[in-house]
Amino acid sequence: MNRLTIKNYEKTNYPSIYSSTYWGHNNSHYESDNIFQNRNSFIINHNIKKFVDIYPKYIDKEFNKLNNYNDHPECYLTNDNFFILLVSPYIEIPYNVDGWDKIYNLYSDSAHTYIKEIIKRSNIKKFHQNIFI
């Protein structure tokens, strides 16, 4: 297979998750092996179940709060029913903006990656019930 035709998602251990992402459909010759390793670690470290292409409006509002830093947005659902929001701007966010935390690079070696965890609204009641049991 010609290296130019290999997509990013095909070089990860989780092609079924990354195959629907914008990043996943880029040609892999642009990425370093470090990014593929980071993508694999991200799935494990954050208990990712799937990529979410169509998400609720309250998730979209969280992305929009970032203004100029909302670059390469991605949304994932964890096995614990939390959303993990991810952005990878080419400029650093100068401080922790509303719960966004910097992690290892996931888009490219030159883009900084930030994530934010948000509980699914449909699980809030169940979450509060479990706290008080």
Image (tube, helix red, strand yellow):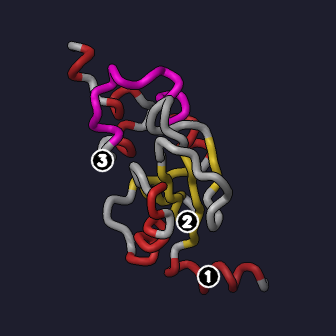
Around disc 3, counting alpha carbons within 10 Å, would you say few (fewer than 14), some (14 to 19), or many (20 or more)? some
Q: Which residue is mark 1?
A: 126
Depth order, front residue of 113/18? 113
Note whether 13 is above or below 125 in the view shown.
above
Q: Is residue 131 left or right of residue 18?
A: right
Q: Which of the numbered marks, if any, corresponds to residue 35? A: none
Could you tell me residue 70's position as x and y percent? Answer: 44, 57
Q: Is residue 112 left or right of residue 107?
A: right
Q: Is the C-beta separation of discs 3 and 1 under 8 Å?
A: no
Could you tell me residue 103's position as x and y percent? Answer: 62, 44
Residue type, mark 3 in image: Ser
Marks 1 and 2 sit apart, C-alpha to C-alpha, by: 13 Å
Q: Residue at x 50, y 63 (%)?
A: 66
Quarter occupied by the N terminus: top left
**Label 3 or label 1, whichever comes before in sequence order:** 3
Marks 2 and 3 sit apart, C-alpha to C-alpha, by: 19 Å
Q: Is the C-beta separation of discs 1 and 2 under 8 Å?
A: no
Q: Residue at x 58, y 42 (%)?
A: 44
Note whether 54 is above or below 10 in the view shown.
below
Furthest-top residue in view?
A: 2
Q: Is residue 61 left or right of residue 78?
A: left
Q: Which of the numbered marks, if any, corresponds to residue 82? A: 2
* Numbered range of the magenta stretch: 23-39
Q: Which residue is mark 3?
A: 20
* Secondary structure beneath label 1: helix
Could you tell me residue 110's position as x and y percent? Answer: 49, 32
Secondary structure of the magenta portion, mostly? helix
Depth order, front residue of 106/88? 88
